[in-house]
Image (spheres, coloured by chain):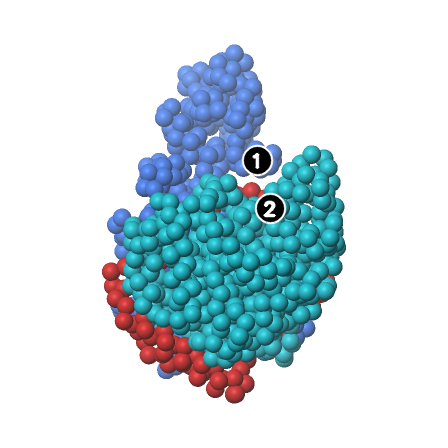
Chain colours: A blue, B cyan, C red
């Protein structure tokens, strides 16, 4: 597939202090998959719980235990890649990544080295100002998560200064997707937009909950800077320990600033790992190792290779829902909705079906969008739902919105009718309005009659208005509404009143 | 008499217990009596599992009483101590696991227990199955029942000695480069390694994942076939276990080799093993012909590269498999000032020299800059070796060769690591190709450094998944030649076995 | 094939096994000897074959995403060299993995 070159966000080069610098950022994300069971055994994949209660010989690394891969985890990872246009190579395999650490039950991690499930792909995102950007994916591969250690004996629970550690293997073996991006990101804002796209897409696909607070999304950033326009890469640092999207933004901004200041004062960037300290608002260099890890990757002899039929991949691809970015683009480009509304609409994939259905029935996209973002969102919230009830239909809601568009019903009447559209009680709003005589009149001649009557009967008020006292206008408006028994279109009444009074 | 109980084959035992002529409980009692008498000298067992045995025996007797028939009813079973059996100490012959109780049972062990077998105890082995003499065990010494000054072979030396000395009827062993076949040959019994993937490895403490297989040791081919039938078959807990229908082997034990083409390897024939041993094998091939087989000369041009290939692949895999022994979750822990020191000290104290050597070589073979030249190169050589066998099977149905280059050597005789590796010269290429292979007693010869004759084994190998054919052929040869009956075990010989003469 | 130079100390560090000077010397010699024998593989032309992935030609062996009863916590912690409050307790860890 063709890969478009990335373009920096229209925000342009970042924080300039004298010289003009460009930041180059790549993200490495670990995403816990939302499967029932773990990657290589049948233990429960669930956050929390008493330590070491979701553990078996396999995920505890007991002698003699063997891994068997979770079919669903493989499928979800492939879907995740397909959602971003990745290539799914025909063959794949698992490799062992060998290193010692107490939260590693086997002191090797089953991962993927040179034949990942997904290769390439593009993550597209929008920014708050309505501009769009993208970042290429290098790869997505599947591996198992480690256990969790807590460090004790120090004052702040941090690793350095601790005297011992406590290890819980509940999380060991949970399936983990590692998404590696190319260094196409240029600002902290883009980085967050990238993460939000990952989150939205993975949540929509049911691949993961993507909750940084629960550890189902972990993110490290590689950050370097270079003179704007340069093609060579500067020395990068790896930033870890960012626990929320906000942390990611703050940490990257902080690191960019640090690197710029360092270079501008004649210093040199050291390639190292730096931990984000949220409290202090800066990154700290972590103790660097004398040599890089030699992971001694080799194909896991306990597992057999994976081979995927093209037909099966095609079927998976064709069954995928439209990704959030594509929906956003449609809303803005095709439906000409404001970017802010589009961004909000995208959060609910089901609304796309409703909106498209309504538009097909001749409803203006903006009007229907307002309904979704207003009354529908409110109802969903109240009832604790993630999508509208089944009784809320496209035909009924479309007709309802048209009545509002045409001015056939007042906003007050609309407020009363809506819940009954929601519950399905009213299936033909036009007919209901007619039957109940709720139609508001937008008949100019008819309303003019009422206006003339009221103006004639309230000469004092008219005089006040002519003097500039607008409050009296409201009173006259009320009188016209009363005379028309609430049926007059208030906007029209206002217009005709002003005409009749003159000036204003 | 108790002696006659323990001398029965597994097949006879199952027949009698199923017919309620004998009870499993009687067999178990007689077995422990015998074990207590002689194991002080043999040293086959690291742990005796009396409580488990008696409970299981009672269960078997109850099931039989309720009308069930179990293929291995009441059969005394020795389990190599690298297989997990819930509630038993499982050590892999190593200090690093001394005292560790397995909380689960290996699939193969569970299956043979479900078939009626009674676990008598866990047997000694070379530490983590690395060795060819049982001398690498950190926890005990096992002696060859035919000569207490000699090794029983390895790494399944304990199971072999237990079966050879009538302490059990069936032994479960594991074979990675010859660890079932070589001790079987040294101890005058049958040792059978199935096709890779036929028997689940779940619960077998891993040495080299792409080579390890569990298999039976027994005094007759029929017994080995019964045991194999009980343990073979796909296991969803082992991703390398093959999902291929299991055909019973115990029902195909014939008496003729008519129509069978037996391949004899010309490269092996060209190497003399000493005139006495050469004669034994020459006679063995002649006996096969007498039974109707056609002897065909075949070539295995890459056979010589087997050891080099094996001693890169197996250590590489084991260096990774043994990383989990780190003092964190189970086993030995020697604490240092920090975790790194703890790892270093625990593993230094817990592993013996041979294990350390293999971990070091294996780590080196996988390390950055050496992976292509060592591990990858070896895996390619392996492809060639496997291709040689496939080619050879175009001209023959089974391949015959020595199981080992010499009979059992003296304890302490081989101090140089590489000379020990050469003991598996004939068995290793077969393992690399994943083929099913069996060792059958084929004669006796005087070792260079001794007077009493020691047994020799004939290694028969079939194509992948050819167990039925293989055991059928082995059985025919066995009952026609009866070499194992020539001498009785010399340990405990006052109590068991009478020379039955050669037929 | 690379020369069989084996840096025993480096490899022992990767394998997390402490060696005395004596051991480093002895193993160094023994392993160099073994690697010397292993060098015979150089003679074998393997340019025309692929590495063996698995002896048996299996593909796609997987399990369904279903739950299976796990070990009781007693069993999990029974062999623990040092346990505290349901956790495995280990000496302090220096550095991130």
Label 2 sits on a secondary structure element that is helix
Q: Quadrant of residue A264?
A: bottom left
Q: Tag 2: Cα neighbours inside 10 Å, few (<14), some, or many (≥20)?
A: many
Work out how far the residue at label 2 is from the one at label 1, CA to CA, in angstroms: 67 Å
Disc 2 designates what residue? B11
- The reply to the same-chain question for discs 2 and 1 is no
Residue A385's disc is: 1
Residue A98 at x, y percent in the picture: 47, 66
Q: Is residue A133 visible?
A: no
Above or below B167: residue A158:
below
Q: Is residue A67 above or below residue A268?
A: above
In the image, residue A401 above or below residue A16: above
Q: Quadrant of residue B47?
A: bottom right
Q: Position of residue A43 (x, y in %)?
A: 59, 49
Query: Residue at image x 59%, y 60%?
Result: B499
Residue mark closest to the camera, 2 vs 1: 2
Q: Secondary structure at mark 1?
A: loop
Q: Chain of mark 2?
A: B
Q: Give the camera-side residue of A421 and B209.
A: B209
Q: Give the percent coordinates (x, y) of residue A26.
A: 39, 62
Q: Residue at x 46, y 34 (%)?
A: A350
Name the residue at 52% across, 68% down.
B454
The quadrant in which the C terminus of chain A is found is top left
Q: In the rendered image, is residue A85 in sight?
A: yes
Q: Is residue A304 left or right of residue B351?
A: left
Residue A301 in percent (x, y) is at 44, 58
Q: Nearer the viewer, residue A337 or A37?
A: A37
**Which chain's residue wears label 1?**
A
**Viewed as shown, does residue B124 lie left or right of B265?**
right
Classify residue A340 by image quadrant.
top left
């Amino acid at each position: 597939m063709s890969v478009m070159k990335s373009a920096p966000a229209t925000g342009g080069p970042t924080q300039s202090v004298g010289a003009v610098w460009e930041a180059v950022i790549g993200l490495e994300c670990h995403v816990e998959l939302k499967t029932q069971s773990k990657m290589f055994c049948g233990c429960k994949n669930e956050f929390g719980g008493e330590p070491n209660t979701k553990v078996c010989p396999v995920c505890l690394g007991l002698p003699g235990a063997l891994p068997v891969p979770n079919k669903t985890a493989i499928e979800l990872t492939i879907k995740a890649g397909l959602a971003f246009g990745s290539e799914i190579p025909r063959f794949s395999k698992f490799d062992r990544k060998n290193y010692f650490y107490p939260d590693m039950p086997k002191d090797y991690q089953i991962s993927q080295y040179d034949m990942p499930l997904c290769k390439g792909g593009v993550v597209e995102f929008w920014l708050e100002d309505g501009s769009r950007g993208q970042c290429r994916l290098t790869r997505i591969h599947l591996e198992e998560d480690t256990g969790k250690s807590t460090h004790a004996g120090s004052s702040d629970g941090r690793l350095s200064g601790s005297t011992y550690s406590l290890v819980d293997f509940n999380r060991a073996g949970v399936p983990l997707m590692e998404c590696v991006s190319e260094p196409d990101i240029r600002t902290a804002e883009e980085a967050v937009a990238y993460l939000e796209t990952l989150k939205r897409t993975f949540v929509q696909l049911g691949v993961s909950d993507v909750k940084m607070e629960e550890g189902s999304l972990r993110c490290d950033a590689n950050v370097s800077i270079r003179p704007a326009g340069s093609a060579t890469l500067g020395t990068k640092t790896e930033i870890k320990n960012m626990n929320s999207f906000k942390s990611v933004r703050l940490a990257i901004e902080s690191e960019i600033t640090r690197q710029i200041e360092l270079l501008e004062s004649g210093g040199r960037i050291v390639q190292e790992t730096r931990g984000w300290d949220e409290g202090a608002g800066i990154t700290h260099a972590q103790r660097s190792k004398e040599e890089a890890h030699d992971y001694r990757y080799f194909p896991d002899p306990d597992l057999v290779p994976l081979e995927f039929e093209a037909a099966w991949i095609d079927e998976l691809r064709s069954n995928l829902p439209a990704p959030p970015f594509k929906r956003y683009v449609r809303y803005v480009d095709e439906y000409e909705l404001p970017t802010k509304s589009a961004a909000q609409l995208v959060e609910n994939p089901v609304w796309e079906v409703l909106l498209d259905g309504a538009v097909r029935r001749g409803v203006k996209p903006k009007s229907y969008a307002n309904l979704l973002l207003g009354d529908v969102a409110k109802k969903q919230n109240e009832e604790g739902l993630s999508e509208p009830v089944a009784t809320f239909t496209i035909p009924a809601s479309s007709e309802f919105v048209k009545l509002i568009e045409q001015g056939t019903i007042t906003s007050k009447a609309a407020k009363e009718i809506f819940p009954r559209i929601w519950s399905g009680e009213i299936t033909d709003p036009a007919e209901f309005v007619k039957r109940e005589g709720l139609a508001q009149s937008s008949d100019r001649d008819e309303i003019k009659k009422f206006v003339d009557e009221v103006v004639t009967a309230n000469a004092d008020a008219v005089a006040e208005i002519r003097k500039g006292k607008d409050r009296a206008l409201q009173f006259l408006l009320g009188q016209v509404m009363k005379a028309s028994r609430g049926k007059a279109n208030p906007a029209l009444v206002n217009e005709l009143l002003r005409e009749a009074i003159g000036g204003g | 008499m108790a002696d006659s109980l323990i001398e029965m084959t597994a097949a006879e035992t199952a027949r009698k217990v199923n017919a309620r002529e004998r009870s499993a409980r009687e067999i178990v009692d007689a077995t422990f009596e015998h074990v207590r008498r002689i194991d002080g000298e043999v040293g086959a067992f690291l742990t005796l599992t009396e409580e488990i045995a008696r409970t299981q025996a009672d269960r078997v007797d109850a099931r039989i009483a309720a009308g069930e028939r179990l293929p291995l009813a009441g059969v005394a079973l020795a389990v190599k101590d690298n297989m997990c059996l819930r509630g038993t100490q499982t050590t892999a012959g190593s200090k690093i696991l001394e005292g560790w109780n397995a909380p689960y049972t290996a699939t193969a062990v569970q299956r043979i227990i479900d078939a009626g077998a009674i676990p008598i105890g866990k047997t000694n082995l070379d530490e983590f199955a690395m060795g060819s003499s049982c001398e690498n065990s950190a926890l005990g010494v096992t002696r060859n029942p035919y000569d207490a000054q000699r090794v029983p072979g390895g790494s399944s030396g304990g199971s072999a000695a237990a079966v050879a000395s009538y302490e059990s009827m069936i032994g479960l062993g594991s074979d990675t480069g010859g660890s079932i076949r070589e001790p079987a040959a040294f101890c005058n019994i049958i040792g059978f390694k199935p096709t890779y993937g036929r028997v689940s490895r779940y619960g077998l403490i891993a040495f080299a994942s792409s080579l390890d297989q569990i298999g039976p040791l027994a005094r007759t081919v029929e017994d080995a076939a019964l045991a194999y039938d009980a343990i073979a078959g796909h296991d969803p807990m082992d991703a390398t276990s093959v999902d291929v229908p299991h055909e019973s082997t115990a029902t195909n034990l014939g008496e003729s080799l008519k129509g069978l083409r037996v391949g004899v390897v010309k490269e092996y024939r060209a190497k003399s093993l000493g005139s006495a041993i050469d004669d034994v094998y020459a006679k063995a091939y002649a006996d096969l012909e007498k039974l109707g087989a056609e002897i065909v000369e075949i070539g295995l041009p890459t056979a010589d590269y087997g050891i080099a290939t094996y001693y890169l692949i197996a250590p590489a895999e084991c260096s990774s498999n043994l990383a989990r022994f780190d003092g964190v979750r189970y086993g030995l822990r020697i604490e240092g000032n920090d975790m790194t020191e703890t790892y270093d000290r625990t593993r230094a104290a817990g592993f013996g020299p041979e294990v350390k050597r293999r971990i070091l070589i294996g780590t080196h073979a996988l390390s950055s800059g050496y992976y292509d030249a060592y591990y990858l190169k070896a895996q390619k050589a392996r492809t060639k070796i496997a291709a040689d066998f496939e080619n050879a099977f175009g001209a023959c149905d089974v391949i015959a060769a020595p199981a080992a280059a010499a009979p059992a050597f003296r304890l302490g005789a081989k101090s140089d690591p590489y000379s020990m590796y050469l003991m598996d010269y004939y068995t290793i290429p077969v393992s690399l190709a994943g083929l099913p292979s069996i060792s059958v007693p084929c004669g006796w010869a005087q070792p260079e450094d001794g007077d009493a004759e020691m047994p020799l084994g004939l290694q028969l190998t079939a194509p992948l998944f050819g167990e039925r054919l293989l055991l059928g052929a082995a059985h025919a040869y066995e009952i026609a030649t009866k070499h194992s009956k020539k001498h009785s075990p010399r340990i405990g010989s006052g109590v068991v076995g009478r020379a039955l003469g050669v037929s | 094939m690379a020369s069989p130079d084996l840096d025993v100390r480096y490899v022992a560090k990767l394998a997390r096994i402490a060696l005395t000077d004596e051991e480093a010397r002895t193993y160094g010699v023994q392993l160099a000897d073994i690697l010397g024998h292993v060098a015979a593989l150089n003679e074998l032309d393997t340019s025309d074959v692929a590495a063996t992935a698995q002896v048996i030609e299996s593909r796609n062996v997987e399990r369904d995403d279903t739950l299976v009863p796990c070990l009781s916590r007693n069993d999990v912690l029974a062999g623990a060299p040092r346990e505290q409050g349901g956790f495995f307790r280990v000496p302090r860890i220096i550095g991130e993995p």
